[in-house]
Image (spheres, rainbow, N blue to C red):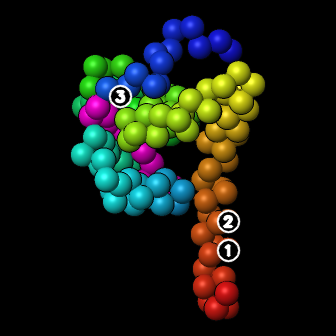
Amino acid sequence: MPRLHSPDPRRASAPVTLFHDGHCPFCQREIAWLKQHPHRDRIRLVDIQTADVAADRGPSFERMMGRLHLRDADGRWFVGMDASRALYAVLGHRRLVAVSMLPGLAWGFDRGYALFARYRVRLGERWRAWRRRSNASGR
């Protein structure tokens, strides 16, 4: 699917609002990292599990549960892998974003993200259980 109408994530303007699933183990790790990031002042974090998403006049809760959503300071929305790209661009990781947008690689990153997003809850539960077993056995 072409991204003809999607804004360029490299041009996202700070501060951005990142809408995340606070129940997702992978999201929790990423949010913990973002809270420690040197440019954390460029991000507003909204846990869609606890916030009134409708108050933000954005996509529905159900839609946000399917893929990551980010809104920049100019009111532009970025969804899925483009939300991650916009986030990392605002944080100053523009080279990484540029690599993820190279022809051929962009398609792979977009599809990989879509697959991950679809199964993230199940994968997160398995990952969390594996970590508990590893920690309990002293590995």
Q: Amino acid at mark 1?
A: Trp
- How many other residues sit within 10 Å of disc 1, few (<14), some (14-19) or many (≥20)? few
Is residue 98 visible in the rendered image? The answer is: yes
The answer to whether one can see residue 19 in this image is no
CA separation in Å, label 3 and label 1: 34 Å
- The residue at the point 65 percent across, 12 percent down is 2
- Mark 1 highlights which residue? 130
**Above or below for 76 versus 52:** above
Q: Quadrant of residue 1?
A: top right
Tell me: 35 left or right of 1. left
Q: Which residue is mark 3?
A: 71
Asked if the residues shown at circle 2 and circle 1 are in contact, with their CB atoms under 8 angstroms apart, the answer is yes
Residue 117 percent location from the top left of the image? 61, 42
For residue 110, which quarter of the picture?
top right
Q: Position of residue 98 (x, y in %)?
A: 56, 29
If you read the primary sequence from the N terminus, does the residue marked by circle 3 or circle 2 appear first? 3
Mark positioned earlier in the residue sequence (3 or 1):
3
Q: Are dots 3 and 2 in contact, CB under 8 Å?
A: no
- Image point (27%, 26%), residue name: 73
127 up-or-down from 102: above or below: below
Q: Is residue 30 magenta?
A: no
Q: Residue at x 40, y 22 (%)?
A: 11
Q: Is residue 10 left or right of residue 81?
A: left
The quarter of the image holding the C terminus is bottom right
Whole-angstrom CA distance, mark 3 to mark 2, is: 30 Å
**Farthest top residue in view:** 4
Decide which of 72, 36 is in the foreground and name it: 36
The residue range painted magenta reads: 14-24
Residue underneath mark 2: 126
Q: Is residue 20 magenta?
A: yes
Residue at disc 2, secondary structure: helix
Examine the rendered structure and indicate whether residue 105 appears above or below residue 44: above
